[in-house]
């Protein structure tokens, strides 16, 4: 009996194990190497696109037979210029004078990363309990509207006003997502469908409130937009008025810590994970699966809601609009996937996406590279993550050992 | 005609499921393939049937190598298979199922059902089956469905028939009938491969026995070998086949079920007003063919069924209609029938699985935080105590063999203070060594004064462990009889016949 450790050659037939079957599980939680390699692949393909759209490269390709060195030089210039611009725009700008100006891009990256991390945590936490939270947009909008409503509708000192607005936003996001959890627990409604539909409901609800005098619309205005946020609810700037980085980023860091503790240390997180991996066993072990769905969606929605709060009270304080989510609700899904649904992974993925976002503007400004290239890279990352066997084949990695 | 497998090797990643297996089966002969669950029997037969491609080795029919790209090739070569889980379409008739995959068609692709009906009648007559070609398969008893599978194989002129664990779903009487059919097939010149892990059946029918362990042939045996010899070959060491237990010292009735009715969401009745009681220090075995309400009984006790009427009393607690957590808190230990579905979280570590049903408070959780240190000490102790073979407490449950997985479940359930143990199929898919161990634990639990409800479809297990036996048939209690009731009587009861003088 020396090698009693073995895997069953053929799995016993029966129900699939847990909510995620193998492939899906690998997509939302698979290993870090595949995630990193997916980014590498996406950047490679992105580079090809930069080359294809670069005019000098195309010109020199016309006489590649006569002077191949021109072509190669043009390629090199296009690629290196593009990534230099990305670096200058996202981390450290070497083209300007003075440390404060040079480091400014990094603070922009952090500013963009904050809400991506918050919303990414909301999506990732739901993943871990076996739920797909596709409702980031609606949750952010509701949260932003609620925080904005507290912001413009009340007149309180900062020490009270700001926390109240933040709380109101988180609560609105929590309830909006919790509704999907409740419907799933009570009626078995699939959370993907419900959260997607709640995006529309939320959008038009906020749109209505913004178009209605007496609700959220700025007095005397005809635009669907609220008044600007008063000083007393605006998240404080972290590095003075010269930088846009605000306290929302600290909120994101704190959330990473809390979610990490929740998932890895707490009994509640233990139950979340049990339900996510095998709801049948969780149920037979006395865990209330329905209540877990509700709880996890409340917390997830609260986190996504904080991303909305981050926007309205920090980044876009000129007033609530229906665009305040700025696509973050959906980008959060990518961030959570790339971060393997783990808090530290989501932190890293959020920073990367923040950098891509910050850098894309300077790439466009300096090199005329369309901003869309970055969007394409982001989409490719998801595509490669969703096809782990493809990434493995390209890099000739061995198959994931089952034992 | 002779079928020969020569040096078949089949690997799944690092795992060698079949390691250079060679065997031969001749016409008019029954070869039994004996081995534990996971020994590689089914893999080998799937290679033979073309479902898997062998990495090495070849299959020869009358000395000619066969090229098998799929089951179609196997069928064309005259190899038929009766699967453990029937490959039949329930809403089709017998004739439709038999022609499925080999449809004969007439003008413009219309199905020639008459030909199929004729074929079914012809084969039925030849072997004395009583099968109506126009009956819907889903309305037929399991034993008859199996005959449909056999007819289907024979209708393709199969000369080699593989029976993969065919008795798992049958009553003892149906098993006897199946053996009779297999003998007839042998007389008619078929070569038969009979896969099983049940020693009794193998000895009863086989002409030759090939024993497989850990993917390799470890020996041949003759049907005259004793159970102990066969078991030792199968396991690789001498095995204790009988369970040693003292006579029960039953105390007062501690667990009483009265007029229990369980319905599913569609209103279908699974348990129809059953009642029984178990005393402290007594094992009540629940016998019956799979699907006669056993699953619903254990789930109703655990609070996992939604529509439960009647009374389930444990001491002073009424359990009917309670949540799973309340039932567990009342001191009910539960070994579910399918550990991979209901018993374990495969991706969790052994340690995490050991606290799966105790995440709501002490001793594993304090102030909302899992006490990792305590859990790890506990897990290490249980690993040693229950002889779980694993690389450590951080090994994932899915990496363990069936027996070790089951030991983790048993360890978790028995390390609480129990006032009732519900054990459903506690040794299904478990190696013989672990079976011995788990049986001892169940007896020890009984001896400590806990009432035990044991559900099993293995009659041997029921007889070995129980103090009294309750037989379920179609959601009703056929009878509750002493453990020394003859097997024939139990078999008849499992088919629904009420014995003389038994108390229902």
Image (cartoon, coloured by chain):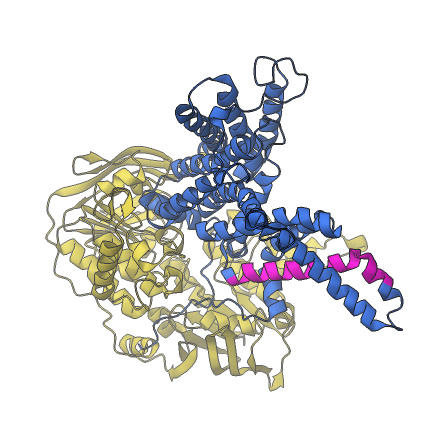
Q: Is residue B136 visible?
A: no
Q: Where is residue B73 shown, x and y percent of the image?
A: 65, 72
Q: Main secondary structure of the magenta part?
A: helix
**Chain A colour in the picture:** blue
Q: Which chain is yellow?
A: B
Rendering quarter of residue A69: bottom right
| Residue A39 forms part of the magenta stretch | yes
**A374 shown above or below B164:** above
- Magenta part of the chain: A33-59
Residue occupying image coordinates x 66% and y 16%: A221
Quarter of the N terminus of chain B within the rendering: bottom right
Quarter of the C terminus of chain B within the rendering: top left
**B86 shown above or below A135:** below
Nearest the eye: B422 or A296:
A296
| Residue B69 forms part of the magenta stretch | no
**A122 shown above or below A58:** above
């Amino acid at each position: 009996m020396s090698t009693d450790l073995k895997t069953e050659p053929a799995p016993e037939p029966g129900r699939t194990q847990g909510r995620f079957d193998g492939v899906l599980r690998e997509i939302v939680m698979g290993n870090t190497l595949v995630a990193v390699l997916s980014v590498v692949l996406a950047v490679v393909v992105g580079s090809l696109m930069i080359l294809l759209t670069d005019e000098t490269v195309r010109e020199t390709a016309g006489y590649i037979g006569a002077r191949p060195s021109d072509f190669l030089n043009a390629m090199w210039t296009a690629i290196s210029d593009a990534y230099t611009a990305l670096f200058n725009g996202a981390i450290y700008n070497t083209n300007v004078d003075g440390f404060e100006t040079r480091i400014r891009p990094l603070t922009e990256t952090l500013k963009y990363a904050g809400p991506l991390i918050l919303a990414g945590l909301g999506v990732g936490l739901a993943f871990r309990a076996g739920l797909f939270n596709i409702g980031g947009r609606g949750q952010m909008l509701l949260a932003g509207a609620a925080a904005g409503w507290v912001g413009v509708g009340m007149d309180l000192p900062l020490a009270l006003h700001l926390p109240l607005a933040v709380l109101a936003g988180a609560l609105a996001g929590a309830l909006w997502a919790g509704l999907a959890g409740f419907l799933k627990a009570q009626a078995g409604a699939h959370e993907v469908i419900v959260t997607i539909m709640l995006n529309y409901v939320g959008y038009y609800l906020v749109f209505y409130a913004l178009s209605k005098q007496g609700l959220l619309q700025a007095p005397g205005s005809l635009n669907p937009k609220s008044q600007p946020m008063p000083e007393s609810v605006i998240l404080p700037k972290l590095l003075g008025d010269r930088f846009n980085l605000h306290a929302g980023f600290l909120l994101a860091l704190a959330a990473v810590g809390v979610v990490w503790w929740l998932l890895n240390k707490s009994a509640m997180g233990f139950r979340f994970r049990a339900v996510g991996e095998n709801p049948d066993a969780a149920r037979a072990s006395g865990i209330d699966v329905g209540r877990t769905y509700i709880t996890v969606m409340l917390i997830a929605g609260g986190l996504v809601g904080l991303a909305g709060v981050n926007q309205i009270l920090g980044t876009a304080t000129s007033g609530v609009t229906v665009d305040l989510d700025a696509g973050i609700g959906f980008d959060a899904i990518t961030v959570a996937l790339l971060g393997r649904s783990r808090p530290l992974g989501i932190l890293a993925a959020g920073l990367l996406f923040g950098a891509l976002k910050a850098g894309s503007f300077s790439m466009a400004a300096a090199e005329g590279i369309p901003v869309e290239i970055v969007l394409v890279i982001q989409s490719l990352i998801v595509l490669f993550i969703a096809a782990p066997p493809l990434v493995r084949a390209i890099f000739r990695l061995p198959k994931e050992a089952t034992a | 005609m002779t079928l020969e497998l020569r040096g078949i090797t089949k690997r799944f990643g690092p795992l060698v499921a079949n390691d250079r297996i060679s065997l031969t089966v001749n016409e008019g002969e029954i070869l039994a393939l004996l081995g534990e669950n996971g020994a590689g029997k089914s893999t080998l037969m799937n290679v033979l049937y073309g479902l898997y491609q062998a990495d090495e080795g070849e299959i020869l029919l009358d000395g000619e190598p066969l090229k098998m790209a799929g089951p179609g090739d196997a069928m064309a070569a005259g190899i038929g298979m009766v699967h453990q889980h029937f490959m039949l379409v329930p809403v089709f008739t017998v004739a439709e199922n038999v022609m499925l995959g080999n449809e004969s068609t007439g003008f413009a692709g219309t199905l020639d059902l008459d030909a199929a009906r004729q074929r079914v009648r012809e084969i039925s007559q030849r072997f004395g089956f009583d099968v109506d070609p126009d009956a819907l398969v889903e309305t037929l008893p399991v034993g008859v469905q199996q005959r449909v599978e056999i007819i289907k194989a024979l209708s393709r002129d199969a000369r080699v028939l593989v029976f993969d664990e065919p008795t798992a779903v049958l009553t003892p009487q149906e098993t006897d009938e199946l053996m009779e059919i297999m003998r007839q097939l042998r007389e008619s010149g078929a070569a038969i491969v009979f896969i099983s892990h049940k020693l009794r059946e193998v000895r009863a029918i086989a002409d030759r026995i090939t024993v497989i362990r850990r993917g390799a042939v470890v020996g041949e045996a003759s049907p005259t070998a004793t159970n102990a010899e066969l078991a030792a070959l199968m396991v690789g060491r001498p095995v204790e086949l009988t369970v040693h237990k003292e006579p029960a010292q039953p105390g007062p009735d501690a667990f009483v079920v009265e007029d229990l009715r369980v319905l599913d969401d569609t209103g279908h009745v699974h348990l129809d007003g059953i009642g029984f009681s178990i005393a402290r220090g007594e094992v009540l075995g629940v016998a019956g063919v799979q699907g006669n309400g056993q699953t619903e009984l254990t789930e109703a006790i655990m609070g996992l069924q939604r529509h439960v009427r009647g009374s389930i009393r444990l001491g002073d607690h009424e359990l009917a209609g309670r949540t799973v957590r309340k039932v567990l808190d009342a001191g009910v230990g539960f070994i579910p029938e399918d550990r991979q579905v209901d018993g374990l979280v495969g991706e969790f570590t052994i340690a995490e699985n050991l606290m799966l049903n105790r995440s709501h408070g002490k001793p594993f959780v304090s102030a909302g935080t899992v006490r990792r240190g305590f859990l790890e000490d506990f897990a290490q102790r249980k690993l040693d105590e229950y002889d779980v073979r694993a690389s450590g407490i951080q090994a994932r449950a899915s990496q363990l063999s069936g027996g070790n997985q089951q030991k983790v479940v048993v360890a978790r359930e028995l390390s609480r203070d129990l006032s009732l143990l519900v054990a459903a199929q506690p040794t299904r898919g478990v190696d013989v060594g672990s079976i011995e161990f788990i049986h001892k634990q169940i007896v020890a639990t009984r001896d400590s004064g806990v009432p035990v409800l044991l559900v099993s479809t293995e009659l041997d297990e029921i007889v070995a462990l129980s103090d009294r036996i309750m037989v379920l048939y179609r959601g009703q209690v056929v009878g509750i009889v002493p453990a020394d009731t003859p097997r024939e009587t139990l078999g008849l009861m499992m088919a629904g016949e009420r014995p003389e003088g038994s108390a229902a």
